Image: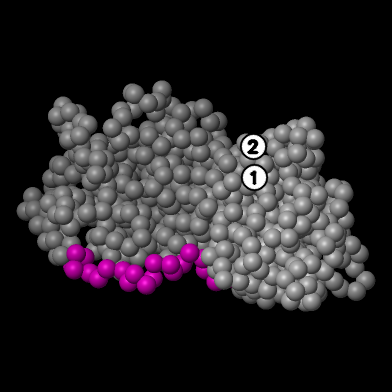
Amino acid sequence: MMHTDTLLKAYRLMCTAKAMADTYEANRAICKYVHSTSRGHEAIQLATAFQVLPCDYISPYYRDESILLGLGFSPYQLMLQLLAKRDDIFTGGREYYSHPNYRGADKPTIIHQSSATGMQVIPTTGVAQGIQYLEQINSDKLVKGPGGELPVVICSLGDASVTEGEVSEAFQFAILKKLPVIYLVQDNNWGISATSEEVRVMDAFDYAAGFPGLDRVRIDGSNFEESFDTMHRVVQYVRQHRTPYLVQAKVPLLGHHTSGVRREFYRTQEDLEKHASNDPLPKLRLRLLQFGVDSQQLQSIEKEAWAAVNEQFQKAAEAPEPDTATVTDHVFVPTPVTEEKGQRQPFGNDKIIMVDAALFAIREIMEDYPEALLYGQDVGRRLGGVFREAATLAEKFSDTRVFNTAIQEAYIIGSTVGMSAVGVKPIVEVQFADYIYPGFNQLVTEISKSSYLSCGKFPVATVIRVPIGAYGGGGPYHSGSVETTLLSIKGIKVVYPSNAADMKGLMKAAFLDPNPVVMLEHKGLYWSKVPGTEDAKTIEPSRDYILPLGKAALVIAADETNITNGESCCIITYGMGVYWARAAAKNFPGQVDVIDLRTLFPLDEELLFERVKKHGKCLVLTEEQQNNSFAEALAGRISYTCFQWLDAPVTVMGALNVPAVPMNMQLEQAMLPNSEKVAAKIKQLLLS
């Protein structure tokens, strides 16, 4: 029989949650930011919170305030987030109510997650993946419980989100790899204004039956005792057996979907009464009376909860607003790599191609950092990447550290959030730039915002490798350029090396950077097989060579005499554009600067503006389709900053504005820039 102390603790917190919801409803003018409450879900949430240890990880979703109360957070702490106040311990006033993130020795770790329903499932499964890896290598980064307990991961989600494809990706990976994760599905039969009967053919319990290896149980989530017993058993099972589990808890929805989508907008009185009849609070009160608890004691608990909530709400309402000067803080956390170090061209080293530079850099990283691993489609033992960019790595480091994934770009990218949170350093690969779009949801909603919205507690340290660009007959889905789309995302860094030395130095810097870095690697430069790209092969830099992000290179410098006489220009470019520009510049000896950006964000504006001001004439060259591109945006920035030094409008050259790179090589060449087209632009610019 359950001890009454546990029931009384749960009752006190249920009363607190109800008092909070009622207080918010009575003070709608003060509680102006959109929020949801846990009314109806309290029993399963508290039962879950009571099982976890500080070594565990838990990802609540936006209706999980009772989980947070059960973990030991105070109403005042939650209210500071509700009201977006300065002292909100989770996000400093930047994030919605019940969107916590937390690092501390006293409670489970909570990674940051977005409001996109179901999107937290991949990052949280990534936490379990990271924990498993730390177990496999016996890492001292693995935090255990006071009795040596192994950590478990709990991912909470609503029933409507289970229909998301990304949830399926997470389930597949968790089962395949046997990860210690519990998916807690709180099923209240509503997905905003849609009932389950309208939008799905099965509930989470039946859906889980289609995933062999995913244990499952369905319970009455409004019954605290049943919920507590089940969650205790499931947590202990996963803690011991290290396999995934799904718990479907049927619960009533007593409040609104959110404060902005109110229940009277879409629910009937009959539906509201049906849900109210299953309210976990009076059900638990009745059980306490049956256990012999005095009704006056329960009344005292109720009054104390109301008084405490009222006092803390008043205090939170009077708390200071954030300092607007901090609005740009925590977009990134500082990187330790700020200077170029090591030998770029050590005596006696051979020349290497770019694909080998990447391979050698990752090999050295994995030798030096046991927390580093590599995964993605086809990078494992048999193939080593479709471009052989990971060849031999699995043989050297084992299938534990280098392995294939399914065709799951969302999982590949999003799992790095959880991996990074536990101290693992993932390097992942998307096979072609054209295939990155299924992973954009995770890149935008989870990765890019994590540092900013957690006030720097959860930056995502990941390197995402993306082979990019046209390389001769690759066709419309293997030749695309995506840098403009990537650069529209704030909170990520984008690197684009054009030669082997830069590849190795930038790869090392990207790995050491505690922020997310996308490495764009041009397929046409990998082996220097494209005519005119022989210089992409360079002497292999030393093992300790590191090239900081955000430093452009002056590849060719014009003669000072020509600059002084106004007979020069500069070309700003990157990737394959460097080789088009170099070839074109041979037609104008001493008259052309060629600047290789190397990093598209952060951008070396200091060097760019300095050279543009010297020449007064500038061409921005890109492989992307020109209209609305990064190159055009950069040209606008240059025009604004360097206007008084310009002798001619800043010129842009990119590919033709068609939707895709054609398969036929003659059509491909007609679409793309080349050295002859660039030379014609230079001539035009010099004569202007």
Start-end of magenta stretch: 315-335
The residue indicated by pointer 2 is 658
> At 37% across and 62% down in the image, what residue appears?
91
**Amino acid type of the residue tagged 2 in the rendering:** Val
Prevailing secondary structure class for the magenta stretch in the rendered image: loop
Question: Residue 220 colored magenta?
Answer: no
Q: Residue furthest right?
A: 348
Q: Earlier in the sequence, mark 2 or mark 1?
A: 1
Q: Residues within 10 Å of mark 2 (few under 14, many from 20)?
A: few
Up/down of 114 relative to 362, above or below: above
Q: How is the image coloured?
A: one colour
Locate residue 87 relative to residue 339 in the image: left or right.
left
Locate residue 536 relative to residue 182 in the image: left or right.
right
Q: Quadrant of the N terminus?
A: top left
Q: Secondary structure at mark 1?
A: strand
Which label sits on residue 625?
Answer: 1
Question: Residue 334 colored magenta?
Answer: yes
> At 67% across and 65% down in the image, what residue appears?
617
Confirm or deny contact between disc 2 and disc 1 (CB under 8 A): yes
> At 40% across and 42% down in the image, what residue appears?
117
> At 15% across and 45% down in the image, what residue appears?
285
Q: Residues within 10 Å of mark 1 (few under 14, many from 20)?
A: many
Could you say which is closer to the camera, residue 225 or residue 449? 449
Locate residue 140 relative to residue 384 in the image: left or right.
left
Residue 140 percent coordinates (x, y) = 60, 66
Q: Quadrant of the C terminus?
A: bottom right
Up/down of 254 relative to 521, above or below: above
Residue 204 percent coordinates (x, y) = 41, 32
Residue 47 percent coordinates (x, y) = 32, 48
